[in-house]
Amino acid sequence: MPPITDAMPDLERDLRFVPVQNDSPQRLTKAQIRQYNEKGFVFPLDVFSQDEIAVHRAGFNQLMDKALKAGWNSYSINCWHTFCPGLYDLTMRPRILDYVQDLLGEDLICWATHYFCKMPGEDRQVSWHQDASYWPLTPSKVVTVWLAIDDADAENGAMQVLPRSHLHGQIAFEKSAEEERNVLSQTVLAAERYGDLPFTFELKAGQISLHSDLLLHGSQPNRSDRRRCGLTLRYLSPDVRAYRDWNRMGIICRGSDPGGHWFHNPRPSEDRIPEKKK
């Protein structure tokens, strides 16, 4: 089959990188803003102390135990921010929002979260892909926060990126082959031709990285004897529009949505594990 150039040809989407214009950042430096524009990412950034991230790690461990008992797996806790108060609260943390605000502005919406938990000795990988290719959103202005719940390094399958690949807009991909053992479903072949040499995001637990939704990234299997868990928090500004009712997954984390497009979900009172369809 020929490569797929648009995952959603029925939707009008603008998948071009929109450079950040911010001459007075409050948390990031001007050099970091420039790096985000030129390379597509900023890393590493300190958010939580070791004691603080230990609390979040314990919360994730409890949540994953509940998820496993309900029939889910270690990658299934996807967009549960409207079901779980601890996860909801993480989307609202000022220390995280302060960084994102320098890239997106004062009005911030979190519309998706996803724990990527690679167990020790696991053979699954994340093939080279662009986040924006999966999402019915336009224009392409989503910033992903990747929060290290565990230490992440090359040995246990830390995320890798291809700097400057975000400048190509939508990149053609193929449906992932079964033998890839891909956690997701899209694979950009010969991805290295679209950017600089692969760069590994080695993060200590409690640190974050920020990357553009158009940046090519992926990760190798975790062949170590240590777990590697990270939480993605997806933020956008309210001028981004969603198709297929994806605007109903939102949380207005800071500021407002003047156009009223994004639904603001209330904080859940207790964990509610979604029922797994058989």
Image: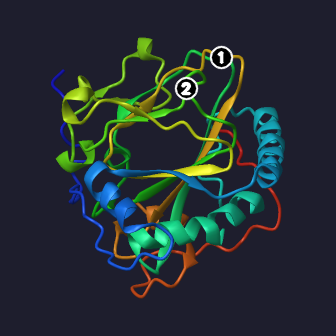
Quadrant in the picture for residue 69: top right
Can you see residue 243?
A: no
Q: Looking at the image, which residue sits at the far top?
A: 179
When the figure is inspected, residue 122 is found, relative to residue 21, above or below; the finding is: above
Left or right: residue 2 versus residue 158 is: left
Q: Do tag 1 and tag 2 residues touch (Cβ < 8 Å)?
A: yes
Tag 2: residue type?
Answer: Gly
Residue 121: image quadrant is top right
Dot 1 amino acid type: Ser
Residue 45 rendering spot, x and y as whole percentages: 55, 55
Give the image's coloring scheme.
rainbow
Q: Secondary structure at mark 2?
A: loop
The N terminus lies in which quarter of the figure? Answer: top left
Q: Residues within 10 Å of mark 2 (few under 14, many from 20)?
A: many
Q: Residue sitting at 36 percent across and 23 percent down? A: 176
Q: Residues within 10 Å of mark 1 (few under 14, many from 20)?
A: some
Measured as percent of width and height from the top left, residue 12 is found at: 20, 60
Label 1, label 2: how far apart the Cα atoms are:
8 Å
Residue situated furthest left in the rendering: 2
Q: In the figure, 112 relative to 186: above or below?
A: below
The disc, 1 or 2, on the residue closer to the chain's N-terminal end is 2
The residue to which callout 1 is attached is 224
Name, please, the residue furthest toward the bottom. Answer: 258
In the displayed structure image, the side of residue 142 where residue 119 appears, left or right: right
Q: Which residue is denoted by mark 2 in the rendering?
A: 157
Image quarter where the C terminus lies is top right
Q: How many labels, in total?
A: 2
Query: As displayed, is residue 249 above or below residue 170?
Result: below
Residue at screen point 64% across, 41% down: 204
Say what secondary structure mark 1 lies in: loop
Residue at 38% x, 46% y is: 131
